[in-house]
Amino acid sequence: MGHKILFILLGLNMLLSSCNQLAWEARHLQRHLHEQQRRAEDLTQHLYHSIETNNFDSLWAYSQEDENIVFYVYYGDKMVYWSNAWLTSSRRMMNPVLDKWHFAQWDNAQGVCYRKKIDEFTVVVAIPLKNDYSITSTELHNSFILPFRCSEEVQLTYRQTDSGRAIYSYDGIYLFSMELPSADEQPKEELLVEMDEVLDNFSYRSIFYSDDKTEAESLRKLRTYYGLMCALIVILLLLAIFSLVRYRGFRRMRLGGKFQIVLTPMVLVILLSVFLASLEHSRRVFIETQQLRLTKKAQYVKMALQNMYFWDMTLSPANTMVLNNDLRDMSYAYEMDIHVYDLNGMLIGTSVPKLFQHGLLPLHIAPQPFFLNESTMVQYEHIGDVRYLSAYTEFINGNHTKIGYIALPSFISQKEINTHLQAYMVKVLPLYLILLLAAIVVVWGISRMVTSSLGMVSNQLKLHRMGESTRHIDYSYSDEVGELVTHYNQMMDALADSTERLARTEREMAWRTMARQVAHEINNPLTPMKLTLQQLQRTKGTERFDAAFDRSTQLLIEQIDNLSHIAKSFSSFAKMPEVNPIKVDVASKLSNFVALMRNNPSDIPIRYVGPDEGVMAIADADQITQVFTNIVKNAMQAMHSRPNSDIIIIFKTLLNNDKARLDSIRSSKQEWIEISISDNGPGIPIEAREKVFVPNFTTKNTGAGLGLPISKNIVEGSGGKITFCTSDSGTTFYIYLKKV
């Protein structure tokens, strides 16, 4: 039961799919049909004007506007003009209803017709929709005609059915229906037995079968080479896409990859263009050769028929049987099928009469040789989608009187064109594949040659560090890269010289600054000491001497202590003890420091946010606490006697979302910790902000101005960084250390 339901559902799904497909194709065909109908009616108006003014010469120009619109002009019952020679016309097109579109069934096609009466003339405009040949094969299909392309199994019928889709004219008149064939309907057989006569002849046999093993082998080789080329192109495209995805766009790719991505498609396009141009040139040359050969054969056939019908003044249906036999004999002699038309353009004899009996070809001649009045011409014609060459020449008797037209269709020439092109491609494709591979190798070599020297310069720049001895790049070529290398070496020499002079100047300036600071700091205590001693001298021998002596000695002791402090500070700065960075539990150091500062008598509270231990970083275990002490003491001095003062210390690990701060302190994927010490003091004055870390600079009345420079030396010596931000509402110092 379940299987039955499944099969029913599958059948319903297939039915719905086919119905939806049929509905879409019906809408597609109807839309294009309405467009063609309007164009056909406009064409009819032009024809009407030309016929009224007896300007029959303009009919030819109108016939070239759209080959899918076929028109016939009748004078009474006689057809006097036709625009195309592939649609088999009949009196069935002469429908009694005037000025109405209706469905038409011809011998070789289905479509719609429109008839208009103009005095004694009748214009029939036909729009073929689908081929309807009685014989089909692998070459000849009953397919829809452009632009009405639909599935070949779709059928056109005048009757309306429930399963079909009705097609209406643009003015709402029913024309025909589209439907899918029923299951019991038998398809048309290929290669009917009654066409044996056709198969025995030369040109048209290629429509029905092809038994050329050489051609099959050529096609097999051609498909192989096409497959190889397509595979190579796909590989190149995949490599290009992979490179673009890997480097996230063209801009991030290396220079060598850019060269390869740009040059390889250019080389591919150039080779493909040259290949297609050579293929087109070979086709043109071969077609011209075939046309010339076909024209010569037409002249030979013309002379032979002229000798055979030397005294005949006209060609009439009475001698059609004899003419057919003569043409059949000549077709075997010249290996060409032959058609003969009378002066009215109607078929009078042929070597393959059953082609016309089965409606594969019309009974009238092509309009070009008939109305253009050229003695000899070669043109392309078609049966369905099968194209072939036809040569036309005048049929002249012995008196040099024109009695008809001779046509020589040549399907073999088109086959030979295809075979020639296939053989040509089989020969040249290996050469182009070799050229393509060679071009890829050359592009890769050029990119490597160009980028290798640039990569050498880039590697040297990566290895260079400020203060290190410079190393020159050896490059022996005098090209653009050589000029770049020369300028780089000159720049390195100039940079080394400039670095040495700068270092020497900085050392000299540092000693001068140190000397001035030492003199200034020592001179400040000496002045009050001198004044104290002078005052003490004036009180010698007086009653105030003892009291003055006590005050003076106390003041001198204080000033001496101050001098000792200054000496120690300058000694510490001069020494600048070396930093010994190791793994340190910075969280534990900071939390212990905060606990110690809270025990000291102070009216300024200290708040700490962060872990108490367990966060390791690179720092000097002995000196990192001094950094915290210097910054916190500066903050306390800045907030002295300021109401609602407090200090906030925050300890945290920087995450990826802190991109702005991370980008300001590093260029790698190293993890960092951040310690911020904030106060709500008055902030650092604008004029003093650039000198915060300058040795011996201070805004206080006491101190040597060495606390923050020493702190900076300790932090940077550990591979970290110290910064600050300040405003009128307070100052925050940031200490960054590498996390481990």
Image (spheres, rainbow, N blue to C red):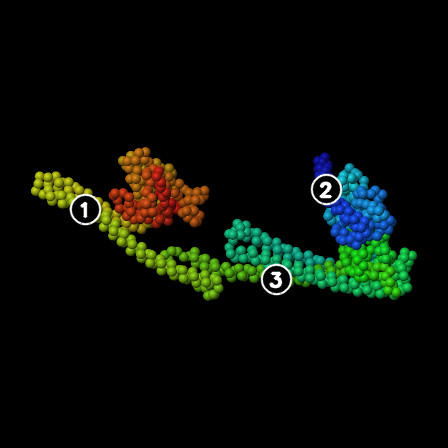
Residue 494 in sight here:
yes
Residue 711 in sight here:
no
Residue position for label 1? 527
Q: Kindly identify which numbered label has been placed on residue 27.
A: 2
Residue at the limit of the structure toward the left, as seen here: 541
Residue position for label 3? 435
Task: Please tell me which residue lies in front, 168 or 477.
Answer: 168
Task: Measure how far apart labels 1 and 3 are at the Cα level.
Answer: 94 Å
The quarter holding residue 329 reads: bottom right
Task: Please tell me which residue lies in front, 209 or 396.
Answer: 396
Q: How crowded is mark 2: few (under 14 residues within 10 Å), some or many (20 or more)?
A: some
Above-or-below relation of 463 to 532: below
Picture coordinates of residue 284, whole percent (x, y): 71, 61
Task: Measure how far apart labels 2 and 3 are at the Cα level.
Answer: 49 Å
Going from N to C along the chain, the mark reached first, 1 or 3, is 3
- Front of the two marks 2 and 3: 2
Identify the amino acid type marked 3: Leu
| Left or right of 357, for residue 477 | left
Going from N to C along the chain, the mark reached first, 2 or 1, is 2
Look at the numbered disc 2 and give the secondary structure of its residue.
helix
Identify the amino acid type marked 1: Thr
Above-or-below relation of 480 to 99: below
- Identify which residue is drawn at 81% across, 43% down: 99
- Identify which residue is drawn at 41% across, 57% down: 464
Identify the amino acid type marked 2: Arg
Tell how many labels.
3
- Identify which residue is drawn at 69% across, 58% down: 222
Q: Residues within 10 Å of mark 1 (few under 14, many from 20)?
A: few
